[in-house]
Image: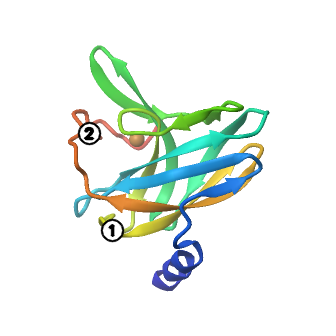
C-alpha cells in the first residue's frame, strides 16, 4: 500500500489542474482529520468549459475504503449530509464543492489526513471520463457547526 501510494503521488504530484474533455478541476483540498476519524471531506471546483452538461458520478482514492458524493440539506433547522447520485456540472459553469455544501466524502479512512500532505483522487464524469486530481490536505481552520454527526454510513 505504501509503495502504491508513493508511486501515485510521484505521478500526480504537482498537478493542480486536471483537464479532460472540457472539464477542469481546480483547487482540490481536504481537511486534516484527527486520529481515529473515520471520514474526511474533500472539496474542489469543477469548471465545465464545454457546451454540453456533464456530471460527476463517482470518486475513488487510495486513502479511503470508499468515497461518496455528498451534499448538505437543512431539515428542521439541522444541517445533515446525505449521499447524492451525481454532482451536476452544467455547460459553461463552475460548480464549487465546499464545506456545508456539496462535497466528496472519504469513507473508511486508512490513516489520518495530515496537513501538508497530498493524495490522489480519481473522479469519474459521465462524459469526460476519468480525471485524476491531487488533493492538498489543509489544517482545519473553521469548526463545522454540524460536523459529521449522524453520519451512519448507509443511505
Ligand atoms: Cu459527507
In percent of width and height, residue 112 lies at 31, 65
Which image quadrant for residue 32? bottom left
**Colour style of the rendered protein structure:** rainbow
Residue annotated with mark 1: 116
> Which residue appears at 49% of the width and 81% of the height?
6
Check mark 1 vs ligand 1: CB closer than 8 Å? yes or no.
no
Image-based side of 152 in relation to 4, left or right? left
**Residue 32 relative to residue 12: left or right:** left
In the figure, 154 relative to 80: above or below? below
Which mark identifies residue 147? 2
> Circle 2 sits in a helix, a strand or a loop, which is it?
loop
Q: Earlier in the sequence, mark 1 or mark 2?
A: 1
Image height of 77 relative to 106, above or below: above
Q: Work out whether 26 lies above or below 49.
A: below
Residue at figure coordinates x 27%, y 16% from the top left: 77
Report helix, strand or loop for mark 1: loop
Residue 84 position within the rendered picture, expressed as x and y whole percent measured from the top left? 54, 34
Taking depth in this image into account, of 40 and 118 the one nearest to the observer is 118
Question: For the view shown, which residue lies furthest in the top direction?
Answer: 76
At 68% from the left and 55% from the top, the residue drawn is 19
**Residue visible at 42% across and 32% down?**
101
Position in image of residue 35 (x %, y %): 23, 64
Amino acid at each position: 500500500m505504501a509503495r502504491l501510494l508513493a508511486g501515485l503521488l510521484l505521478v500526480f504530484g504537482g498537478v493542480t489542474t486536471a483537464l479532460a474533455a472540457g472539464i477542469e478541476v481546480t483547487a482540490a483540498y481536504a481537511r486534516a482529520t484527527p486520529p481515529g476519524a473515520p471520514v474526511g471531506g474533500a472539496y474542489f471546483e469543477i469548471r465545465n468549459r464545454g457546451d454540453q452538461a456533464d456530471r460527476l458520478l463517482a470518486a475513488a482514492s487510495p486513502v479511503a475504503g470508499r468515497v461518496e458524493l455528498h451534499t448538505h440539506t437543512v431539515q428542521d433547522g439541522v444541517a445533515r449530509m446525505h449521499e447524492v447520485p451525481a454532482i451536476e456540472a452544467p455547460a459553461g459553469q463552475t460548480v464549487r464543492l465546499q464545506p456545508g455544501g456539496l462535497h466528496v466524502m472519504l469513507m473508511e479512512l486508512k490513516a489520518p489526513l495530515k496537513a501538508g500532505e497530498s493524495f490522489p483522487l480519481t473522479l469519474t464524469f459521465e462524459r469526460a471520463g476519468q480525471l485524476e486530481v491531487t488533493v492538498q490536505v489543509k489544517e482545519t481552520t473553521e469548526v463545522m457547526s454540524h460536523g459529521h454527526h449522524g453520519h451512519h454510513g448507509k443511505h
